[in-house]
Amino acid sequence: MAYKSTKSSGLKMVVGLMFLALLISIGYIYTAEEFERVAPTIKSADNMYWNKIKPIKVVLHDNIGLKSFDLILSDGKNSVSVGRGEIDAETKKQTLLIKYPEGKGLDPEAKKLILQVSVSDRSFWNFMQGNSNRKNITILLDYKRPNVNILSNSYSITQGGSALVVFQAEDENLDELYVEVGKVHFKAQPYREKGFYVALIAWPFNQDDFKAQLIARDIAGNSRSVDIPYYVKTHKYRTSWIQAKDSFIDGKITDLASEDPKYAGITDKIERLKAVNEKMRLANEELIHSLGKNLSTDFLTSWKITKFYPLRNGQRVASYGDERHYYYKTKDNIVSHSYHVGYDLASTKMASIKTSNAGKVVFSSSNGIYGNMPMIDHGLGLYSLYGHCSQVLVNDGDDVKAGDTIAKTGVSGLALGDHLHFGLLVQGIEVRPVEWFDQSWIRKNIDNIFKEADIIIKGQ
């Protein structure tokens, strides 16, 4: 009997060990990274438009590693393989570019395709087959380019100046619409009726060549570009040499530098001048440009602007577009360089500054070298700014009317005498204020363009 008991106990021990091993194995399978159960992901739009030209982009991702993929394109009757393969070990992300399979059995007249994407990973799960995922992408084929017609535009544009264009753009799947001038894209605002748009554009003063193209692009990638026929007028802007005196550097420059931690520790006076006149200036202008880029997407029914006259009896003390070279002690010792992108006016000390056109205040604080600086949105991408103020009498978000007093002239920022730095921007690009001082220019280049376009729109 003792023998049987010992044999029975041994059997139980073996069974117990086997069961424990099984539990450990199951636990390992469910917890080990090699047996992970997370399916790979397929990133793409569920529905898309395609013109068969630009490849379709699909991104595969897995938390451990991708193994293989399979791509099938179908027109509903016929199916063709457009991609299949193994993915290198340890690859967690793979981007696939799918081209249209010309001459491979799909109906060339098909308007709709289905792309089936299958992917598997390198997990040992599912009896070493790994985790898998599948996605069907609906593709609508579109080869038609947008229809674009220019209704009316300003006859000419001057280097550093502004111009207007009203046009028609039609496409069921219109995606992008802008006027391209060099590297700058000017957005268009819907005008009066569906399919009609207006854009106020600018020619940057420091850009020698000018070409304006109207670009319309749909979701499928079809595009059309149309040249806008402006008569181009170049303009030579003034270059000046300014002596950077010690009193200027130790005074205004040092005061501005001390207010900003990035520049407060600069001990060399020439480096301090360069930091304020160049680095701080560019940072201040970057803020101005970002504030002036916004354009409403609401329908514009009309836009009336009158000439700007911000300072009564104001006399010009500096022009727009001046290129300034600062020298220290001798003219051949140029130590700093900048551009003056506004128009300086002076009258009496702390004179009232008025806005000539209604708008909304988008900024009313201090902005480095510009000092206290209210900035106003007048619609259609046109913004006015008023620098070096001693007082600002408006706040962010305020609606102002033509004739409202918004500030007082002063010497804040990088100003040596009491004056107003007046600036105008079109979608973040500084433009010639003198054009907008002239009611005749506004009538010929803005008002008349709207009138010509309105006649065409009404006759549609």
Image (spheres, grey):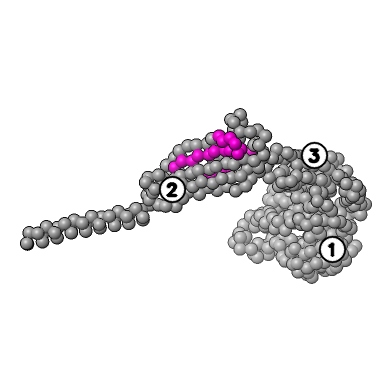
User: What's under tag 2, amino acid-wise?
Assistant: Asn
Range drawn in magenta: 54-80
Say how many tags the image has: 3
Inter-mark Cα distance, 2 to 3: 53 Å
Q: Nearer the viewer, mark 2 or mark 1?
A: 2
| Labelled disc at residue 387 | none
Q: Residue at x 44, y 45 (%)?
A: 121
Q: Nearer the viewer, residue 258 or 97?
A: 97
- Measured from the top left, where is residue 327 in percent x and y? 72, 51
Tell me the amino acid under the disc marked 1: Ala
- Residue 168, image x and y in percent? 81, 45
- Dividing the picture into quadrants, the one containing residue 310 is bottom right
Q: Would residue 130 be found to the left or right of residue 437 on screen?
A: left
Q: Which mark is residue 131?
A: 2
Q: Please tell me which residue is depicted at 79% across the width and 39% down the height of the picture.
A: 226
Between the residue at mark 2 and the residue at mark 1, the CA separation in whole angstroms equals: 63 Å
Q: Quadrant of residue 350?
A: bottom right
Instruction: Using the image, tell me which numbered label, if any, was put on residue 358.
Output: 1
Residue at image point 67% right, 56% down: 283
Which mark is nearer the camera, 2 or 3? 2
Closest to the camera, between mark 1 and mark 3, is 3
Q: Residues within 10 Å of mark 3 (few under 14, many from 20)?
A: few
Answer with mark 2 or mark 1, whichever residue precedes in sequence.
2
In depth, the one of 4 and 349 nearer the eye is 4
Per the image, the residue denoted by label 3 is 227
Q: Is residue 105 left or right of residue 341?
A: left
Q: Quadrant of the N terminus?
A: bottom left
Instruction: Give the mark nearer the N terminus: 1 vs 3.
Output: 3
